[in-house]
Image: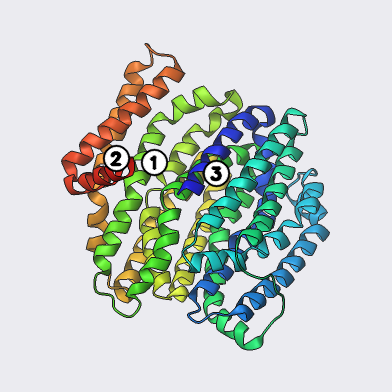
Amino acid sequence: MAQNLFTQVFGLLLFAIQAPLLGPRAFGLIALVMVFIGFCEIVVEVASSDALISVRDIDGEHYATMTSANAIFALTLGLCVCFFAADIAAFFKEPELAPILRWMSVLPLVSALASAPNAASRRAMQFKPLAQRVLISTVIGGVVGLALTFLHYGVWALVWQTMLQRVLNVVILWRLVDLPFRLGISRPHWRELWRYGGPMLLSQTMSWCTAQVPRSIMGLYLGAAELGLFTLGARIHEMVLQLTLSPGFAVARVELRRFLDDTRGIDAAMTRLLQQMAFLCFPICIGGAAVMPVLFQVWLDARWAGGIFAAQLMLLGAIPYVTHYGLSAALLAMNRQSLIAVNSTVQAIATVVVVAIFAPFGLTPATAAIALRPLATATIPMVYARRHCGISATTVLRAQVPLSLAALGMGAAVWTMSHLLAPHLHAGARLVVLIAAGAVVYALLLALLAPQIAARYRERFRIRAT
């Protein structure tokens, strides 16, 4: 949580400085590049790490085999991106993409080398090295990127910022984790890893398609500038997921393995997990959507104004991910990777279809389609969790209803206050007042609608304070 909080806040502050200087187009170009370069980071590393976590009796040959296989695949992918860079740039009608793609084609190999130490730390429930490498690499990469921005390097400031951050990320992780760097492929070990990694590779590929293919379609129809506006909303959306859902998912995916042989008590554990995720996610999404126009007025210049509604839609679209993340953690803990792969495939197909249909009509229809997709498909993991984990739909919904009502009441109050205060306070002061009032209203409504949950968190805060 500390890692994600720091990186997201630091990244947001960095973006707040760079966005007015670089404009939407620079961020749109990087978004297009990451469609191709980010495959290893989003797909290969995560699938490989999960396979290494899923193996019950692990040894050094598992780690060496996975590292070698990842390196071979990533090197091949990087060479293909470098070779076809000019063709990709011509397809999107953005000549500046070609040199950026060639320079950043080294990143797949860099990202692929992180899966072994990543998995070793997670298996041992040692998250400190993972946090340390992200904190250090984020700060150094961000400072360099900011300096290059002020030196008028344009989009290349973002290029070198991204490359330096990824390289440091991997180097520092190998230094901090007690795991020897070894290469070599063992066929028996590879077969065992593939039994878990194959479905997860498909699942992560579909997740990558869900995030990146729509960007390609929107970039093709709307151009880099409009894509930059969408990317801002997607960045805020991702920030919320990383802060409120990802930490609980990372721990629960390992912790819930204790129910692998005996599912008694998993309903209670899932209720606690969903409430923990929703406690912050719901008010941030709903309250954030209510204050978004004021935030843009304080934060960004007129070039970004067209992204307000898209950012609001993307924030609200994060709410159903509480269900998706929570149930996915349970399914992975039960080694149901194949079901995760099926679910991810459905999500990816649904996203690509709706974006392909609505992108020609503009940014708002396409963003609305993306935001509504997780709500429309939330029943799929609920059905799987009921059949294979013994988690009822009633448990899933009952855990979230009180928190959703409290967040909705808070959002309505903040939206009303924003309009009432507009003639009397300038944007900066109004934003501070709205955030403070939202926190107070949410706490009061939570105490009224869900006293047991409110009491639990009051006790946690009291213990931490002492």
Residue 5 seen in the figure: yes
Mark 2 element type: helix
| Residue 375 image point, x, y percent | 38, 54
Residue type at mark 2 is Ala
* CB-based contact (under 8 Å), mark 2 and mark 1: yes
| Residue 370 image point, x, y percent | 48, 50
Mark 3 element type: helix
Q: Give the CA separation, mark 2 to mark 1.
A: 9 Å
Q: Nearer the viewer, residue 427 or 351?
A: 427
Residue type at mark 3 is Thr
Residue 369 seen in the figure: no
Lower sequence index among marks 3 and 1 = 3
Q: Which residue is mark 1?
A: 285
Q: Nearer the viewer, residue 226 or 260?
A: 260
Structural crowding at the residue carrying mark 2, measured as other residues with C-alpha within 10 Å and reported as few (<14), some (14–19) or many (≥20): many
Q: Give the CA separation, mark 3 to mark 1.
A: 19 Å
Q: With 385 as the anchor, is 225 left or right in this view?
A: right
Q: With 2 as the anchor, is 164 left or right in this view?
A: right
Mark 1 element type: helix
Q: Which residue is mark 3?
A: 7
* CB-based contact (under 8 Å), mark 3 and mark 1: no
Q: Which residue is mark 2?
A: 407
* Relative to 237, residue 17 above or below: above
Lower sequence index among marks 2 and 1 = 1
Mark closer to the observer (3, 1):
3
